[in-house]
Image (cartoon, helix red, strand yellow):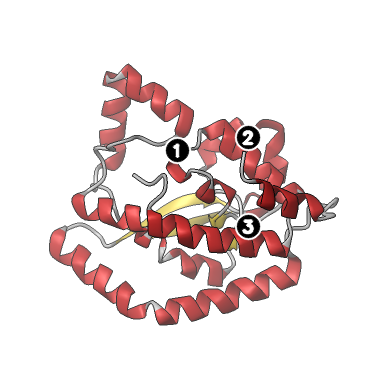
Amino acid sequence: MFDAELSMLLRQSNNSQYTVGGKTKRVFDVLVAIATLIAALPLFFCVFIALKLTDPGPVFYHHVRVGRGGRRFPCIKFRSMVVNSDEVLKSVLENDPERRDEWMRTQKLINDPRITPMGQFLRQSSLDELPQLLNVIRGDMSLVGPRPIVPAEMPRYGDKLDLYLQARPGITGIWQISGRNDCEYKKRIEMDANYVRHWSFAADISILIRTFVAVLTRKGSY
């Protein structure tokens, strides 16, 4: 599922009660998120201006996600899709069986028709997720955690939903360093469950470092 070194770090953790990080993880999240946001302010401003100049729609996209304990929160991103993205997706899934199967397997589409040219760049560079640092500071998310899901995805988690709900969803996670968009949905669920079962601070650090490498190489992004 993911490489042996990270697997060993997760197994070494005695996380029998599935308490994901506690105060240590939260303090680390806030300090790193604030420092990163301050350092990235010029980049943040550049992306804001670029979106304003290339697209008449809103700069930010707020989408309801499920957080720890089932609490809903608005996940913030730079908008990378057309304004009528829901209608475009519905049309594609209704008229193209192959793409519908792809969506059911991965909840992603290769060459997604909803993504704008500027949005393509933002996604490949992961800059669209930069505003999620605000979600981390607010306590909605963590730097590392399960993939944030929408309420409609909850039934697909089955008996692993309770595990998902015990952690703040992350900007990155095991799915991000194990193929990113290439990972099938069932595999991502299992990765998230293993993360919660065997959380360790060392594993979080390893995931953050490998995420940086994955972003630089654009591994599995589209």
| Res. 45 in view | yes
Left or right: residue 35 versus residue 130 is right
| Percent of width and height locating residue 145 | 61, 55
Q: Split into 4 quadrants, where in the image is the N terminus?
A: top right
Q: Earlier in the sequence, mark 2 or mark 1?
A: 2
Q: What amino acid is found at the position of numbered circle 1 in the picture? A: Asp
- Which quarter of the rendering shows the C terminus? top left
Q: Secondary structure at mark 2?
A: helix
The structure residue drawn at horizontal position 28% and vertical position 41%, both measured from the top left corner, is 85
Name the residue that disc number 3 marks.
168
Q: Which residue lies under the disc numbered 1?
A: 182
Report the front residue among 119 and 205. 205
Q: Residue at x 78, y 49 (%)?
A: 11
Report the Cα–Cα distance between label 2 and label 3.
16 Å
Q: Is residue 172 above or below residue 193?
A: below
| Amino acid beneath label 2 | Tyr
How far apart are the two marked residues, 2 and 1, measured between alpha carbons? 19 Å
CB under 8 Å between discs 2 and 1: no
Say whether residue 79 is left or right of residue 21: left
- The percent coordinates of residue 34 (x first, y second) are 51, 79
The total of numbered circles placed on residues is 3
- What secondary structure is marked by label 3? loop
Above or below: residue 99 compared with residue 166: above
2 or 3: tag closer to the N-terminus: 2
Alpha-carbon neighbours of circle 2 within 10 Å: few (<14), some, or many (≥20)?
some
Between marks 1 and 3, how big is the CA–CA gap? Answer: 23 Å
Dot label at residue 157: 2
Left or right of 88: which side holds 134? right
The mark lying in front, picked from 2 and 1, is 1
* First in residue order: circle 1 vs circle 3: 3
Whether 2 is drawn above or below 58: the answer is: above
